[in-house]
Every structure is written in C-alpha cells, then in structure tokens.
Image: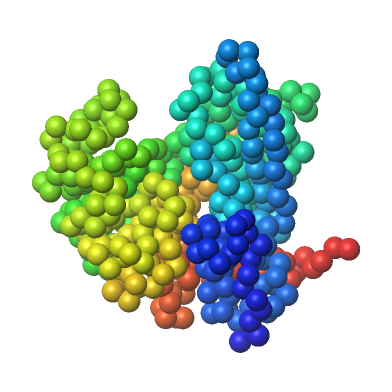
Amino acid sequence: MATQIARTPDVEHGAAQHHDLFAVAVEQFHIAADVLGLDDDLRRILSRCQRELTVNFPVEMDDGSVQVFTGHRVHHNIGPGPAKGGFRYHQDVTLSEVKALAMWMTWKCAVVGLPYGGGKGGVTVNPKLLSSSEIQNLTRRYTAEIAAMIGPNKDIPAPDVNTNPQIMAWLMDTYSMIQGYSVPAVVTGKPLELGGSVGRSEATGRGCVFAIEEAAKSRNIDINKTKTVVQGFGNAGSVAARLIADLGSTVVAVSDSRGGIYNENGLDLRAVEAHKARTGSVVGYAEAQDVTNEQLLVLPCDILIPAAMENQITQANAGKISARLIAEAANGPTTPEADKILYDRGVLLLPDIFANAGGVTVSYFEWVQGLQAFPWTEEQVTERLRDIMQKSFHAIDTTAKHHSVHMRTAALVRAIERVAGFTKIRGIFP
C-alpha cells in the first residue's frame, strides 16, 4: 500500500470541522484510495478540484433595486471528458458544498461509465423569495458570469435543487446569445421543445428504484412485503415513492423541508401530492400523523430513501435506523461515521454516487441526442437506464465483496480506479 499523505483538504472554515461537506468528500476519497493503494501523486491530484470560480454579480429586482448575489462553478476533474453537473439555488450554498458535489459528480459519472468529469454550480439565494422575472434575471446573469467555463464540450450544467427545465432554457438561451447561434447541447434537463429528453424529469427517482429493485433481488428481499420511508418529496423523492409503490412496497412516510407525515398502514401518494399542491407541504395531511424529518429517518421500515439534503444520517442516529436497505437519492446524506455503523449492523446502503446516478445518466442520453439532433423514445431511454443501473450494481457489489468493504467504498474504488487510469494515461501537460 502507498505511503499515506496528509489528509488536510483545502476547505472553507478548516478541514477539522467534520460537517464541512468537502472534508467529508475527501475523507471518503482517502478511504477508497487506501483500499486501492493509490500512490501519493494521484492522491494529490484527485483530492483537489481542478478549477473553482466564484462570482459576485448584480441583479435588478422587480422594484428597481439592485441586489448582489454570490455564485460558484467548480470543475473537480475533466480527465474523462467534459465536466457534468447541476447547479442549485439555495440559501445555504457554499463553495465547500459545491466542491464536494463536483467531486462526487466525478465519481458518479465514472461508476456508471459515463464519459464525463465532475462539475457543479450554485448560487447562494432563497429562490422562494424571488419572483419568476427575478429568477430569470438571476439565471441569465449567473450564466453570463460563468459562460467561459461552460460549453457542450467543456461543461454541461443541469437541474439540481430549486432549478428546473425553465431555468435550463434561460441558461441555454443566454449562452446561445453570447455565442451568436443556438447551442442546445450546452445544458441538459431542458424542456422537450428545446431538445430535452423524454424521461429526464423522472430519471433520478427511476434510477434509484432500479437500483433498489436489483439490490432487493440480490439480498432476497421481497419488495411486495416491504415498507418504505422517503425523506424529501421533491422531484427525486416523489418519483421514487410512486415507482416503489408501483412495485408493491407500502410507502408509510414522506417528508419535505417543513416536516413529514407517517401512516403505518400506508399513504395514498396521489392524495398526498394533491395536499402538497394545495398547501405547499405534505405536513398536515389528514390521513397521517405529522413527524419531524429527524423522527422520520428512524421510523419502522424496510427501505429508506433519503432524497433531501446532506448530512441527514449521522453517528447520532445511524444506530436507530430500522431499514435493511437504504438508497441515497440525495447527495451526501450519510456521514462516514454513519457509514461504518450501518455496515457493521448489516444494513445495505446504496450510495449516492450510484443510487442517484439516473439523473446524470439520462442527462448523458440527452446530451448525445442533442449532439446528434436525433431524439430517442421513452422506452429506449428507460431500458438503457435500467441496463446501466443493473450492471453497475453488480459491479459494485462484486467489488464490495472482494475487498470486504461497504458499498460506498466499493463504488468509490471503482470510480477512482477509472479516473486514476485516465490521469495516468493522459499524463501531465506540459
């Protein structure tokens, strides 16, 4: 095994703070690098982000005033191909978070075999406080600020937290105006009318359920006899909940940012969606009791799908989780300390860089369709996604058993080995 180098990543507020998301990402990297026996030179390269851009830009508001917002765009590694990763609008966005997400995107693309490196972006803003016209102004100005970093063969953004197909359309239009011609392949997750792919909006949740389905078969879990809890009822969580219910699992609890609801006999998901559409939250649904997001994670269930934000499953609550199978539809919901506790308890955890790779996989399909100007059918998209998720699960599971490690480390081992191979073959320029 290679001599270990210092584990201190260059992160905001100091790497010693374990809650710093980039510190978590780097810690996960080194755990897998130890298994691989990765040499010091490759550790130095792959444990850092290649490019980091921070922009402070003015936006004119509806009342004529001007507000200044801070945004980021990060490339972790572009050895395998163009950077790929979404951008989010959230009040808690930090450079450290964006760097971690960019690193995870590198591994996510590698673990399912996509020809991409990892990128990510975000703006520190609460979009719920902005009008549609203000969000459009914000999007167009942010796009103009990062335009030098993006492009169909450089970096292809996509939707993430609080961003959607309309926002992708504004990004594509702004970038196209700067270039002087239409460039639909600069972004994925676009509306169908602009070259988006069928099945893209459901892809993250659908890919997660494909992963659960394959994992359940391998562990002799009958999904028809399971109860499922879903933390997060946005795009990924609501789709995952609906699809796993279609497979026969009883969804007993869901939540959003305001809290959760629980009915041990199962939820009528269509009624829950209608309630949320009326009230803005699942909380207060008449046929269930309200629970907090913290309580929801430890409810009695067989399958747990964290589909909300980072750092939800920690050392403090990992020992209380009753699920036999956890599938991370969110990015970074589980800390390294919790990973070890769950593994020691025999819980099968499907890590984010695999379980939520359906989104980037179908984004890849959209990108290919855009470059070729040749759309696929939804059946083609779904079957190709299923095939990739099934093959990736078995490859990760085989690696986990070979090295006697949990699935996150196994997925990282496969991903890091692939990206390290690109790095060694390409060499260092100049």
Q: Is residue 406 left or right of residue 247?
A: right
| Image location (x, y in percent) of residue 45 | 71, 67
Q: Nearer the viewer, residue 136 or 7?
A: 7
| Image quarter of the C terminus | bottom right
Q: Residue at horizontal 62%, vertical 56%?
A: 12
Total tally of numbered discs in the picture: 0
Q: Is residue 100 above or below residue 410?
A: above
Q: On the rendered structure, is 310 left or right of 76?
A: left
Residue lying at 47% horizontally and 42% vertically, measured from the top left? 381
Point out residue 206 in the picture as x, y percentages from the top left corner.
38, 45
Q: State whether residue 134 appears in this view.
A: yes
Q: Is residue 119 above or below residue 166?
A: below
Looking at the image, which is closer to me, 212 or 131? 131
Q: Image quadrant of residue 422?
A: bottom right
- Residue 300 x/y as whole percent: 18, 57
Position of residue 49 relative to residue 36, above or below, is above
Instruction: Name the quarter where the N terminus is drawn.
Output: bottom right
Can you see residue 383? no
